[in-house]
């Protein structure tokens, strides 16, 4: 996002810089307690300290999962469109990435469970889940998640649930449900990836973690990362503790700002037919349907108009565009006006 990180995070980093010694570091008991308190308060999820496995980023986690729970030539399933590192993770280790399109009906994105079931083979080992989903902005319901995990359970598939956007819930009548909390069996087959980096806007500090309650899965995950995944950045540990301990008020203000930005984007896109978009329930991302404007490269069209949008092709969603509205409102308004002008001048 185009916002400063919370003042508490900036203060903590300044204090650590003033210390002047930048050696290796380990997660403190205080950080573990802060993570547990945060998950309990926001998700009603009680975790144990030993379930946490530290990561320098969640993209690493996706790749570790593919290596830990699938062999070369095995299938790794995911629903698209999806954040590009999901698509790359299986092929990075000679696993087969298998994609199933999400259903888009009446302006709402959902899983196509029949197609997911039909895509499963005897070599399907892992389902990579994005929850909340990047880029479509869905906050999956309990019913949707339950159906998905029941399919995975029938076929003995390990679930990797990337929940990095789980604190960025924009619909105030909804709450994030960690996949692993659905049942004891689900927890036993789930690796949950978490980080404060997107929420508190310090992804460059490389701090994240996996939550794995099943001891066997945790051991396999750690074995797959041994010797190749670096320790957490010292400043990431500092920032993470400060964010979880003192970032609550900042986060609530951020969510209020993002809700207004979300509403602004939805209203603006509704006034630019034939562009359209689904309602954004979570994240700070708008997934815009540009398939009906008759252009081979809509991303290039808007870039030439002075607006940089992510090309849906990178997400396995050709014809769509991703707009990040985690930005000051004046800049967002300018971008939307340029898009409207470009549409009017076609």
Image (cartoon, rainbow, N blue to C red):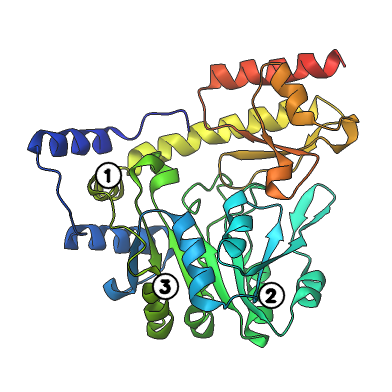
Query: Earlier along the polypeptide chain: callout 1 or callout 2?
Result: 2
Between the C-alphas of marks 3 and 2, the distance is 29 Å
Residue at 61%, 80% (x, y): give it: 157
Q: Quadrant of residue 243?
A: top left
Q: Secondary structure at mark 1?
A: helix
Query: Earlier along the polypeptide chain: callout 3 or callout 2?
Result: 2
Residue at 82%, 19% (x, y): give it: 343
Relative depth, front residue between 181 and 87 = 87
Number of the front mark, 3 or 1: 3
Give the crowd class for mark 3: few <14, some 14-19, many >=20 residues within 10 Å.
Answer: some
Q: Position of residue 326 (x, y in %)?
A: 52, 32
Residue at 69%, 80% (x, y): give it: 151
Q: Could one spot residue 191 in this view of the protein?
A: yes
Give the crowd class for mark 2: few <14, some 14-19, many >=20 residues within 10 Å.
Answer: few
Q: Secondary structure at mark 2?
A: helix
Q: Position of residue 299 (x, y in %)?
A: 73, 30
Q: Position of residue 114 (x, y in %)?
A: 82, 73
| Residue that label 2 marks | 147
| Residue that label 1 marks | 239
Query: Is the residue 176 above or below the residue 212 in the image?
Result: above
Query: Is the residue 123 above or below the residue 67 in the image?
Result: below
Query: Earlier along the polypeptide chain: callout 3 or callout 1?
Result: 3
Residue at 67%, 16% (x, y): give it: 306
Between the C-alphas of marks 3 and 1, the distance is 27 Å
| Residue that label 3 marks | 224
Between the C-alphas of marks 1 and 2, the distance is 37 Å
Is residue 176 rendered to the left or right of residue 220? Answer: right
Q: Contact, CB < 8 Å: mark 1 with mark 2? A: no
Q: Position of residue 303 (x, y in %)?
A: 70, 22
Q: Quadrant of residue 200?
A: top left
Relative depth, front residue between 119 and 268 = 119
Number of the front mark, 3 or 2: 3
């Amino acid at each position: 996002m185009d916002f400063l990180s919370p003042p508490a995070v900036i203060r903590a980093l300044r204090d650590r810089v003033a210390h002047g010694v930048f050696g290796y570091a380990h997660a403190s008991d205080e950080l573990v307690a802060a993570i547990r308190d945060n998950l309990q308060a926001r998700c009603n999820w009680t975790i144990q300290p030993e379930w946490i496995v530290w990561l320098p980023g969640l993209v690493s986690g996706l790749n570790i999962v593919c290596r830990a729970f699938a062999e070369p030539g095995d299938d790794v399933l995911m629903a698209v469109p999806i954040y590009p590192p999901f698509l790359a993770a299986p092929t990075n280790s000679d696993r087969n990435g298998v994609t199933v399109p999400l259903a888009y009906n009446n302006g709402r994105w959902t899983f196509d469970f029949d197609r997911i079931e039909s895509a499963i083979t005897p070599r399907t080992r892992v389902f990579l889940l994005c929850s909340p989903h990047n880029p479509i902005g869905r906050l999956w319901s309990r019913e949707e998640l339950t159906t998905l995990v029941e399919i995975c359970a029938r076929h003995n598939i390990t679930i990797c649930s990337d929940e990095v956007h789980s604190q960025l819930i924009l619909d105030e009548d909804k709450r994030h449900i960690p996949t692993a909390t659905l049942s004891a069996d689900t927890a036993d087959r789930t690796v949950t990836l978490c980080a404060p980096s997107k929420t508190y806007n310090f992804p460059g500090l490389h701090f994240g973690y996996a939550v794995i309650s099943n001891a066997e899965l945790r051991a396999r995950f750690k074995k797959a990362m041994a010797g190749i995944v670096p320790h957490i950045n010292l400043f990431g540990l500092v920032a993470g503790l400060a964010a979880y301990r003192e970032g609550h008020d900042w986060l609530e203000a951020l969510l209020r700002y993002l809700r207004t930005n979300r509403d602004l984007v939805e209203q603006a896109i509704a006034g630019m037919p034939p562009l359209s978009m689904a309602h954004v329930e979570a994240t700070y991302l708008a997934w815009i349907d540009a398939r009906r404007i008759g252009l081979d490269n809509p991303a290039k069209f808007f870039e030439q108009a002075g607006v940089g949008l992510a090309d849906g092709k990178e997400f396995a969603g050709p014809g769509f565009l991703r707009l990040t509205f985690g930005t000051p409102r004046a800049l967002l308004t300018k971008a939307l006006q340029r898009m409207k002008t470009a549409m009017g001048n076609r």
